[in-house]
Amino acid sequence: MPFDAQAYWEQRLGRHPGREGVGHAGIGEGLNGWMYRVRRRVFLRELAPLMPTLPTRGVLDVGSGTGFYLDRWRELGASPLVASDLTEVAVRRLRASNPDAEVVRFELGSEPPSELRDRRFGAISAMEVVYHVLDDVGYAHAFATLRELLYPGGVLVFSENFLHGEELRAPHQRSRTLDQIERVVRTAGLEIERRRPQFWLMNAPHDSTSRIRRLWWRGLAGIATRSDVAGTCLGALLYAPELLAVRHLREGPSTELMICRRPR
Protein backbone atom coordinates (compact mmCIF):
# COMPACT_ATOMS: atom_id res chain seq x y z
CA MET A 1 0.00 0.00 0.00
CA PRO A 2 1.28 3.54 -0.79
CA PHE A 3 2.18 5.57 2.29
CA ASP A 4 -0.75 7.77 3.40
CA ALA A 5 0.92 10.85 4.86
CA GLN A 6 -2.27 12.53 6.04
CA ALA A 7 -3.55 9.42 7.83
CA TYR A 8 -0.15 8.89 9.46
CA TRP A 9 0.10 12.44 10.79
CA GLU A 10 -3.55 12.68 11.79
CA GLN A 11 -3.04 9.57 13.93
CA ARG A 12 0.35 10.60 15.32
CA LEU A 13 -0.64 14.16 16.22
CA GLY A 14 -3.97 12.97 17.59
CA ARG A 15 -2.19 10.51 19.89
CA HIS A 16 0.67 12.86 20.86
CA PRO A 17 -0.45 16.51 21.04
CA GLY A 18 2.85 17.66 22.60
CA ARG A 19 6.50 17.73 21.56
CA GLU A 20 6.73 14.00 20.86
CA GLY A 21 4.07 14.27 18.17
CA VAL A 22 6.13 16.69 16.08
CA GLY A 23 9.59 15.83 17.41
CA HIS A 24 11.52 12.58 17.75
CA ALA A 25 8.99 9.78 18.19
CA GLY A 26 9.57 7.27 20.96
CA ILE A 27 11.90 9.20 23.27
CA GLY A 28 9.21 10.94 25.33
CA GLU A 29 8.47 14.52 26.23
CA GLY A 30 11.50 14.97 28.52
CA LEU A 31 14.35 14.82 26.03
CA ASN A 32 12.16 16.23 23.24
CA GLY A 33 11.52 19.29 25.40
CA TRP A 34 15.25 20.02 25.69
CA MET A 35 15.74 19.37 21.98
CA TYR A 36 13.18 22.08 21.25
CA ARG A 37 15.05 24.45 23.55
CA VAL A 38 18.12 23.89 21.37
CA ARG A 39 16.06 24.42 18.21
CA ARG A 40 14.79 27.72 19.62
CA ARG A 41 18.28 29.04 20.33
CA VAL A 42 19.62 28.05 16.90
CA PHE A 43 16.62 29.49 15.06
CA LEU A 44 16.71 32.85 16.87
CA ARG A 45 20.48 33.15 16.53
CA GLU A 46 20.40 32.58 12.76
CA LEU A 47 17.25 34.53 11.89
CA ALA A 48 17.54 37.60 14.13
CA PRO A 49 20.27 39.27 12.01
CA LEU A 50 18.19 38.77 8.85
CA MET A 51 15.02 40.47 10.07
CA PRO A 52 16.08 44.00 9.01
CA THR A 53 16.85 42.69 5.50
CA LEU A 54 13.38 41.23 4.82
CA PRO A 55 11.14 42.99 2.28
CA THR A 56 8.25 42.59 4.73
CA ARG A 57 7.80 41.02 8.17
CA GLY A 58 4.86 38.90 7.04
CA VAL A 59 5.71 35.21 7.58
CA LEU A 60 4.34 31.84 6.43
CA ASP A 61 5.16 28.82 8.62
CA VAL A 62 4.73 25.50 6.78
CA GLY A 63 4.01 22.34 8.76
CA SER A 64 3.25 24.32 11.92
CA GLY A 65 2.26 21.32 14.04
CA THR A 66 2.06 22.60 17.62
CA GLY A 67 2.95 26.17 16.64
CA PHE A 68 6.49 26.10 18.03
CA TYR A 69 7.99 28.17 15.21
CA LEU A 70 5.09 30.61 15.24
CA ASP A 71 6.24 31.54 18.75
CA ARG A 72 9.79 31.97 17.49
CA TRP A 73 8.64 34.35 14.76
CA ARG A 74 6.73 36.32 17.39
CA GLU A 75 9.95 36.62 19.40
CA LEU A 76 11.60 38.05 16.28
CA GLY A 77 8.82 40.60 15.80
CA ALA A 78 7.30 39.09 12.65
CA SER A 79 3.73 40.02 11.70
CA PRO A 80 1.29 39.11 10.23
CA LEU A 81 1.67 35.36 10.72
CA VAL A 82 0.18 32.61 8.57
CA ALA A 83 0.35 29.02 9.87
CA SER A 84 -0.28 25.89 7.82
CA ASP A 85 -0.44 22.16 8.30
CA LEU A 86 -1.45 19.03 6.44
CA THR A 87 -3.74 17.68 9.16
CA GLU A 88 -7.18 18.68 10.37
CA VAL A 89 -6.22 18.02 13.99
CA ALA A 90 -3.24 20.42 13.84
CA VAL A 91 -5.23 23.10 12.00
CA ARG A 92 -7.99 22.93 14.59
CA ARG A 93 -5.55 23.23 17.51
CA LEU A 94 -3.56 25.99 15.84
CA ARG A 95 -6.68 28.09 15.30
CA ALA A 96 -7.64 27.67 18.95
CA SER A 97 -4.18 28.52 20.33
CA ASN A 98 -3.12 31.23 17.84
CA PRO A 99 -5.96 33.74 17.50
CA ASP A 100 -3.56 36.33 16.07
CA ALA A 101 -2.54 34.07 13.15
CA GLU A 102 -4.30 32.97 9.97
CA VAL A 103 -4.31 29.16 9.74
CA VAL A 104 -4.77 27.20 6.50
CA ARG A 105 -4.49 23.59 5.40
CA PHE A 106 -1.55 23.07 3.09
CA GLU A 107 0.28 19.90 2.01
CA LEU A 108 3.83 20.77 1.03
CA GLY A 109 4.59 19.32 -2.39
CA SER A 110 1.08 19.95 -3.72
CA GLU A 111 -0.57 23.10 -5.07
CA PRO A 112 -1.09 25.80 -2.43
CA PRO A 113 -4.67 26.36 -1.26
CA SER A 114 -6.73 29.28 -2.51
CA GLU A 115 -5.92 31.27 0.66
CA LEU A 116 -2.24 31.37 -0.37
CA ARG A 117 -2.53 31.92 -4.09
CA ASP A 118 -1.28 35.33 -5.25
CA ARG A 119 0.17 35.93 -1.77
CA ARG A 120 3.77 36.83 -0.98
CA PHE A 121 5.72 36.72 2.28
CA GLY A 122 8.93 38.24 3.56
CA ALA A 123 10.00 34.94 5.09
CA ILE A 124 8.89 31.30 5.08
CA SER A 125 9.87 28.57 7.54
CA ALA A 126 9.56 24.85 6.79
CA MET A 127 11.19 23.22 9.79
CA GLU A 128 11.27 19.45 10.27
CA VAL A 129 8.90 19.05 7.33
CA VAL A 130 10.53 18.93 3.86
CA TYR A 131 12.09 15.48 4.42
CA HIS A 132 8.55 14.14 4.77
CA VAL A 133 7.95 14.90 1.07
CA LEU A 134 8.87 11.47 -0.26
CA ASP A 135 8.71 11.64 -4.07
CA ASP A 136 11.20 13.66 -6.11
CA VAL A 137 8.59 15.47 -8.20
CA GLY A 138 6.76 16.65 -5.10
CA TYR A 139 10.04 17.67 -3.45
CA ALA A 140 11.09 19.82 -6.39
CA HIS A 141 7.57 21.27 -6.62
CA ALA A 142 7.69 22.13 -2.91
CA PHE A 143 10.72 24.39 -3.32
CA ALA A 144 9.38 25.95 -6.51
CA THR A 145 6.15 26.76 -4.68
CA LEU A 146 7.92 28.19 -1.65
CA ARG A 147 10.02 30.38 -3.93
CA GLU A 148 6.88 31.74 -5.62
CA LEU A 149 5.37 32.53 -2.20
CA LEU A 150 8.33 34.75 -1.30
CA TYR A 151 8.76 38.39 -2.17
CA PRO A 152 11.99 39.10 -4.07
CA GLY A 153 14.60 39.37 -1.35
CA GLY A 154 12.56 37.13 0.96
CA VAL A 155 14.10 34.33 3.01
CA LEU A 156 13.32 30.60 3.21
CA VAL A 157 14.59 28.69 6.25
CA PHE A 158 14.21 24.92 6.43
CA SER A 159 15.80 21.92 8.12
CA GLU A 160 17.08 18.71 6.56
CA ASN A 161 19.72 16.04 7.21
CA PHE A 162 21.89 17.03 4.18
CA LEU A 163 23.59 13.65 3.95
CA HIS A 164 27.13 13.41 2.63
CA GLY A 165 26.69 9.69 1.94
CA GLU A 166 23.78 7.72 0.51
CA GLU A 167 20.22 8.83 1.17
CA LEU A 168 18.15 7.15 3.89
CA ARG A 169 14.50 6.16 3.59
CA ALA A 170 11.78 5.34 6.11
CA PRO A 171 8.02 4.97 5.53
CA HIS A 172 7.33 8.58 6.58
CA GLN A 173 10.70 10.25 5.90
CA ARG A 174 13.36 10.47 3.21
CA SER A 175 16.72 12.02 4.01
CA ARG A 176 18.35 13.20 0.78
CA THR A 177 21.97 14.00 0.08
CA LEU A 178 23.45 17.49 0.34
CA ASP A 179 24.12 17.49 -3.43
CA GLN A 180 20.51 16.52 -4.22
CA ILE A 181 19.06 19.21 -1.96
CA GLU A 182 21.35 21.97 -3.17
CA ARG A 183 20.53 21.10 -6.78
CA VAL A 184 16.78 21.23 -6.14
CA VAL A 185 17.05 24.51 -4.21
CA ARG A 186 19.06 26.21 -6.95
CA THR A 187 16.84 24.84 -9.72
CA ALA A 188 13.87 26.39 -7.91
CA GLY A 189 15.56 29.78 -8.25
CA LEU A 190 16.77 30.23 -4.68
CA GLU A 191 20.21 31.37 -3.55
CA ILE A 192 21.79 29.46 -0.66
CA GLU A 193 23.14 31.80 2.02
CA ARG A 194 24.27 29.38 4.73
CA ARG A 195 23.84 26.03 6.46
CA ARG A 196 24.32 25.45 10.18
CA PRO A 197 23.94 22.39 12.46
CA GLN A 198 20.92 22.19 14.76
CA PHE A 199 22.28 19.26 16.79
CA TRP A 200 25.53 17.49 17.55
CA LEU A 201 24.80 15.41 20.65
CA MET A 202 21.02 15.25 21.09
CA ASN A 203 19.69 13.78 17.86
CA ALA A 204 20.14 10.68 15.69
CA PRO A 205 23.44 10.93 13.72
CA HIS A 206 21.96 10.25 10.28
CA ASP A 207 24.89 11.96 8.56
CA SER A 208 27.62 9.93 10.22
CA THR A 209 29.18 6.52 9.76
CA SER A 210 30.83 6.64 13.19
CA ARG A 211 30.01 3.60 15.29
CA ILE A 212 30.74 5.58 18.45
CA ARG A 213 28.18 8.25 17.53
CA ARG A 214 25.56 5.63 16.76
CA LEU A 215 26.19 3.84 20.06
CA TRP A 216 26.01 7.19 21.86
CA TRP A 217 22.60 7.98 20.35
CA ARG A 218 21.30 4.47 20.98
CA GLY A 219 22.26 4.73 24.64
CA LEU A 220 20.84 8.24 24.98
CA ALA A 221 17.52 7.31 23.38
CA GLY A 222 17.36 4.10 25.42
CA ILE A 223 17.64 6.01 28.70
CA ALA A 224 15.18 8.71 27.56
CA THR A 225 12.52 6.12 26.70
CA ARG A 226 12.53 4.77 30.26
CA SER A 227 10.81 7.85 31.68
CA ASP A 228 10.30 11.54 31.00
CA VAL A 229 12.25 12.29 34.18
CA ALA A 230 15.29 10.46 32.79
CA GLY A 231 14.95 12.27 29.45
CA THR A 232 14.62 15.62 31.19
CA CYS A 233 17.77 15.03 33.26
CA LEU A 234 19.75 13.98 30.18
CA GLY A 235 18.58 16.99 28.22
CA ALA A 236 19.49 19.37 31.04
CA LEU A 237 23.01 17.90 31.26
CA LEU A 238 23.59 18.10 27.49
CA TYR A 239 21.99 21.48 26.82
CA ALA A 240 25.03 23.71 27.42
CA PRO A 241 27.59 21.54 25.54
CA GLU A 242 25.09 21.14 22.69
CA LEU A 243 24.74 24.90 22.33
CA LEU A 244 28.52 25.30 22.29
CA ALA A 245 28.89 22.63 19.61
CA VAL A 246 26.23 23.98 17.24
CA ARG A 247 27.57 27.54 17.60
CA HIS A 248 31.20 26.80 16.80
CA LEU A 249 31.09 23.77 14.47
CA ARG A 250 30.09 24.24 10.84
CA GLU A 251 29.22 20.62 10.02
CA GLY A 252 27.08 18.34 12.15
CA PRO A 253 26.17 14.63 12.13
CA SER A 254 22.44 15.32 12.38
CA THR A 255 19.75 17.79 11.35
CA GLU A 256 20.92 21.13 9.98
CA LEU A 257 19.26 24.41 9.12
CA MET A 258 19.61 26.04 5.70
CA ILE A 259 18.79 29.64 4.84
CA CYS A 260 18.01 30.60 1.23
CA ARG A 261 16.88 33.80 -0.39
CA ARG A 262 14.82 34.63 -3.45
CA PRO A 263 16.97 36.97 -5.57
CA ARG A 264 15.85 40.57 -5.67
Image (tube, rainbow, N blue to C red):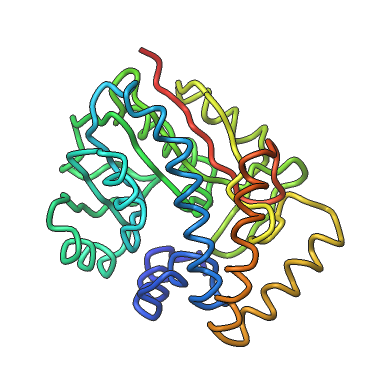
Above or below for 119 versus 241: above
Taking the view exactly as shown, the residue that stands out farthest to the left is 99
Spot occupied by residue 105 in the image (x, y as percentages of width and height): 24, 54
Image quadrant assignment for residue 121: top left
Position of 205 relative to 237 (above/below)? above
Name the one closer to the observer, 19 or 132.
19
**Residue at point 36% right, 51% down?**
69
Q: Quadrant of the C terminus?
A: top left
For this rendering, which residue is in front, 20 or 33? 33
Q: In screen coordinates, is 167 left or right of 135?
A: right
Q: Residue at x 45, y 44 (%)?
A: 43
Name the residue furthest top.
264
Residue 100 at x, y = what percent? 13, 52
Q: Nearer the viewer, residue 82 or 35?
A: 35
Measured as percent of width and height from the top left, residue 146 is found at 36, 34
Left or right, 162 with respect to 50, comes to right
The structure residue drawn at horizontal position 49% and vertical position 65%, both measured from the top left corner, is 23
Tell me residue 205's x, y (percent). 71, 56
| Residue found at x 66% / y 36% | 178
